[in-house]
Image (tube, rainbow, N blue to C red):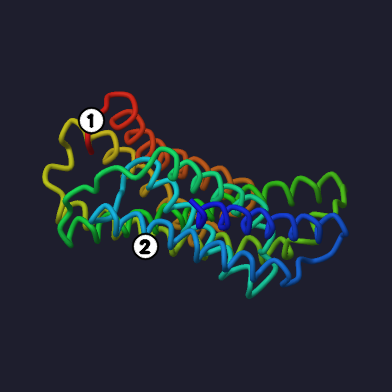
Amino acid sequence: MTIVLISVALYLLATGLLVANVRRDETPGRNWLLPAIAAVALHACAHLLAWRGAGGADMHFFAALSLIALGMAGLTVIVGAKGRMAALGVVVFPLAAITLVGYHLHGHLPPEPLDWRLQLHAWTALLAYATLAIAALLAVMLWLQERALRRREVHGWLRALPPLVELETLLFRTIKVGFVLLSATLLTGVLFVDNLLAQHLVHKTVLSVLSWLTFGALLLGRWRYGWRGAVAVRWTLAAMILLVLGFFGSKFVLELVLKIAP
């Protein structure tokens, strides 16, 4: 419990430092970086200690939420430390804190008996979801930035973001990485998961494939037709909604509503 509370406090401290910088119309410096790194490290330790006590990795609903948010926080630290995308932390760090608390209060279920192949599939999936969730946040930021510029509304938070072209480039780079990871997730699912079209997996499989096709169509449209701006935002968010419904929608219904083990 102590590790969880300290991690949450550090996440909120990092968020507060980022917000303070934006409110002063300053580009976020590095004063948020150390508490953010410590929060991410303690977040990971909370999971590792729980798994050691349970005898294996927990991949249930609240654990998966917390792990994806952990991945998002880690990516935010890496990207934010190298450039001007620290503003992502204003959304990601509180989200990581909330999901960690949710995991602590409702998680810690007996681990599923997964061999190394299914564990590879599960970890690849979590990393893919974390990366594409960051892409979805970047898409929202791109939309907000374009909207503000069109209306000639100069807000302080605009100074915390990179130029429009740089933000768009980062969005597509993130989508490419996420697309590769999602492709690996589907491939390992085909190779290692028994009967992907079983009743309890069919919705997850179909929606994940539709999301993969949507992300693929977006990347193809970017390469072939130069898609950008609002078009890129709409396709990114549509693909992410499909992915969230496929993974967490199915997991929520199975585990929390029907009480069926995944």
Measuring 66% from the left and 53% from the top, which residue is drawn there? 12
Q: In this rendering, would 259 be left or right of 165? A: left
Mark 1 or mark 2, whichever is nearer to me: 1
Q: Which secondary structure lies at badge 1? A: loop
Q: Which secondary structure lies at badge 2? A: helix
Measuring 65% from the left and 62% from the top, which residue is drawn there? 167
> Which mark, by number, is residue 260?
1
In terms of depth relative to the viewer, which is nearer, 230 or 57? Answer: 57
Indicate the amino acid at tag 2.
Val
Question: Which percent across, then down, holds residue 200?
Answer: 21, 33
Q: In this rendering, would 48 be left or right of 175? A: left
Q: In this rendering, would 30 be left or right of 74? A: right
Quadrant showing the C terminus? top left
C-alpha distance separating marks 1 and 2: 31 Å
Q: List the single residue furthest toward the left.
A: 194
> Which mark, by number, is residue 51?
none
In terms of depth relative to the viewer, which is nearer, 246 or 64? Answer: 64
Q: List the single residue furthest toward the top.
A: 258
Measuring 15% from the left and 35% from the top, which residue is drawn there? 198
Question: Which percent across, then down, holds residue 104?
Answer: 44, 45
Question: Which percent across, then down, holds residue 256?
Answer: 34, 29
Measuring 63% from the left and 50% from the top, which residue is drawn there? 91
> Which mark, by number, is residue 180?
2
Badge 2: residue crowd in 10 Å (few <14, some 14–19, many ≥20):
few
In terms of depth relative to the viewer, which is nearer, 16 or 3? Answer: 3
User: Given contact means CB atoms under 8 Å apart, are the residues at marks 1 and 2 in contact?
Assistant: no
Q: Earlier in the sequence, mark 1 or mark 2?
A: 2
Q: In this view, does 109 lie above or below 127?
A: above
Indicate the amino acid at tag 1.
Ile
Question: Which percent across, then down, holds residue 133?
Answer: 50, 51
